[in-house]
Image (tube, grey):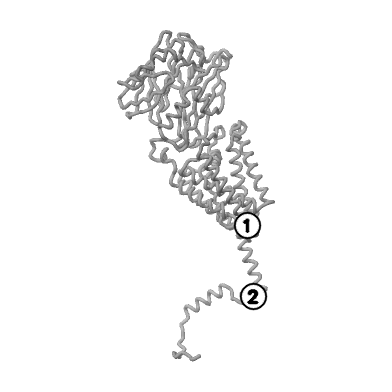
């Protein structure tokens, strides 16, 4: 663990701990809020550094505006870093007791953020000291790159610590246990409160996990990398959800550790006027899932009773999902156009499923499609759990899809034995989940990623290497309760109402054939003597076009 040396530094408490004339005094381990405007450079000062401290990291965090952190007041005279989460590491000289770094705004805007100084001893690993990829000689930062599907973090390897004035051990000579190759890297993840994009929420979260102890207590250990592994990790993107990533490098021989500079992301842009963090939900998406949620609520409680409506909704969902994947992967259409095309094809798919039942009357063929919908949702839920993050699924697409398909295909087999009960269960579970998706269009909930992770895996070739962790907070437990209550209520209501009815309604076409055959053979039926429909229509046309002849009698007849 890092060495915290407070006794000599307690004398600094009486000093002014506020921003003065372009000068801010930092106390080790204490966060300081700093703001600076265009063409203003703020000097961050640390004084009375104890001799036991071998190196110091200064980290500065803003929500979405870039800040430049540099070793010199004039940027061209020394290394600097510009980012929303920036950090510099300074290796101290033998007699050095003070330190100055500089903060400035690169974009000509007023920048407000929070920063902290963390001291470390000579036995602690030096994060980023074996950097060969990034610009700084010693780079303790965690770099984040994201897209719609995945968020990737990268960092530079660390080196062993050393006393002040000593030459650091070389990084690329040998792989023995006496070199930096014995170091291990723990990747941590910390979720900010859901549906909270405020600066206060971010700064509170950063302050909770900035050091080693805070991250270990509040964050979640996702994985541990060895020095022989690539210094990177990939996670699923959750647009609009704040996540803080950090790396803790450990020396197992000396039992010491050091924290890299944490970085955060919302997987969206705060400056975009279209689809930014504040306007994540597209109008087309909200309209689509609002209608889907209303249809799902109807299916949840009345799907089996109105069998044709249920078949249309299931066929629509099945065809829309399939063709959305197909259109997105094979064309370069924009999202709104892909959604519109998929919805139109989904309507055709729903109508075809209804017509197949109407024409052929094969209930089992339709129930298989309904069972596949339930199987898809169950398989997605199973692989949404931590089971889906097992290495066997992350490293092999074949194993993942074989497992997924097996779970998906097993479910319809139960429908062969209990078709009505299986159909009602599908109506309750799938219909209630459609309501959850409709709520997600307005308020973020992690339950939407049950199906969204599968969709991302279909659309992204490299998604198998992604960690699919999502936060589970108050809104998610509320939505789980809503899902369960709606699903159970819908199933119980339909099972009770349908207990004395036929298992499934008869096919209208087959009923029409039977009725026509009955009319042909039953001469006592009045409808048997009715002329065919074409003859009736022709007679009606003649009646309308025939001229009415006068009867010559205008006096009403007496009864």
Q: Classify 10 Å Cα crowding around label 2: few (below 14), some (14-19), many (20 and above).
A: few
Viewer-nearest of discs 1 and 2: 1
Q: Quadrant of residue 48?
A: top left
> Which residue is under mark 2?
525
Q: Classify 10 Å Cα crowding around label 1: few (below 14), some (14-19), many (20 and above).
A: some
Q: Is residue 96 visible in the rendered structure shown here? A: yes
- Label of residue 498 in the image: 1
Q: Quadrant of residue 11?
A: top left
| Mark 1–mark 2 CB contact (< 8 Å) | no
Camera-side residue of 465 and 163: 163
Q: Left or right: where does residue 261 sit relative to residue 513? A: left
Q: Residue at x 36, y 25 (%)?
A: 34
- Badge 2 marks a residue whose secondary structure is loop
Q: Left or right: where does residue 554 sit relative to residue 372? A: left
Q: Which of pointers 1 and 2 lies earlier in the amino acid sequence?
A: 1
Residue reaching furthest to the right: 417
Camera-side residue of 110 and 321: 110
Residue 121, given in percent of the width and then of the height, sits at 48, 13
């Amino acid at each position: 663990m890092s060495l915290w040396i407070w006794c000599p530094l307690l004398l600094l408490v009486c000093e002014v701990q506020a921003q003065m004339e372009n000068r801010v005094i930092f106390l080790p381990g204490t966060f300081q809020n700093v703001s600076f405007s265009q063409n203003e450079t703020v000097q961050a000062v640390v004084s009375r550094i104890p001799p036991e401290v071998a190196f110091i990291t200064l980290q500065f965090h803003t929500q979405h505006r870039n800040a430049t952190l540099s070793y010199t007041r004039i940027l061209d005279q020394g290394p600097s870093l510009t980012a929303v989460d920036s950090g510099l590491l300074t290796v101290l000289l033998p007699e050095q007791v003070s330190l100055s770094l500089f903060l400035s705004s690169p974009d000509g805007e007023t920048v407000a953020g929070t920063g902290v100084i963390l001291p470390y001893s000579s036995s602690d690993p030096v994060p980023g000291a074996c950097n060969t990829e990034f610009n700084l000689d010693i780079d303790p930062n965690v770099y984040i790159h994201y897209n719609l599907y995945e968020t990737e973090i990268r960092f530079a390897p660390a080196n062993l610590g050393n006393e002040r004035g000593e030459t650091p051990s070389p990084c690329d000579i040998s792989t023995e246990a006496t070199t930096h190759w014995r170091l291990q890297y723990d990747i941590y993840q910390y979720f900010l409160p859901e549906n909270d994009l405020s600066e206060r929420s971010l700064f509170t979260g950063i302050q909770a996990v900035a050091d080693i102890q805070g991250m270990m207590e509040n964050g979640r250990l996702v994985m541990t990398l060895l020095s022989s592994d690539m210094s990177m990790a990939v996670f699923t993107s959750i647009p609009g959800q704040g996540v803080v990533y950090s790396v803790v490098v450990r020396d197992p021989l000396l039992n010491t550790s050091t924290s890299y500079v944490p970085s955060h992301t919302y997987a969206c842009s705060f400056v975009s006027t279209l689809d930014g963090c504040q306007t994540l939900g597209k109008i087309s998406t909200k309209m689509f899932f609002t209608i889907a949620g209303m249809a799902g609520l109807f299916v949840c409680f009345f799907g089996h009773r109105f069998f044709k409506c249920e078949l249309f909704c299931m066929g629509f969902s099945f065809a829309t999902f399939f063709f959305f994947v197909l259109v997105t992967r094979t064309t370069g259409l924009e999202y709104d156009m892909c959604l519109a095309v998929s919805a139109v094809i989904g309507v055709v798919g729903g109508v075809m499923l209804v017509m197949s039942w109407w024409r052929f009357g094969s209930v089992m063929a339709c129930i298989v499609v309904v069972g596949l919908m339930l199987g898809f949702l169950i398989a997605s839920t199973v692989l949404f759990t931590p089971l889906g993050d097992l290495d066997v699924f992350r490293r092999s697409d074949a194993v993942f899809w074989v497992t997924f398909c097996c779970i998906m295909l097993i479910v319809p087999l139960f429908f062969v034995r209990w078709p009505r009960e299986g159909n009602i269960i599908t109506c309750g579970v799938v219909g209630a989940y459609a309501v959850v998706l409709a709520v997600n269009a307005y308020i973020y909930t992690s339950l939407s990623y049950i199906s969204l992770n599968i969709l991302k895996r279909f659309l992204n070739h490299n998604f198998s290497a992604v960690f699919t962790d999502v936060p589970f907070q108050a809104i998610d437990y509320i939505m789980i309760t809503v899902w369960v209550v709606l699903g159970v209520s819908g199933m119980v209501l339909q099972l009770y109402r349908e207990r004395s009815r036929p298992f499934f309604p008869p096919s209208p076409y087959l009923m029409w054939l039977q009725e026509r055959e009955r009319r042909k053979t039953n001469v006592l039926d009045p409808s048997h003597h009715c002329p065919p429909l074409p003859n009736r229509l022709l007679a009606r046309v003649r009646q309308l076009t025939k001229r009415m002849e006068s009867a010559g009698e205008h006096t009403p007849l007496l009864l």
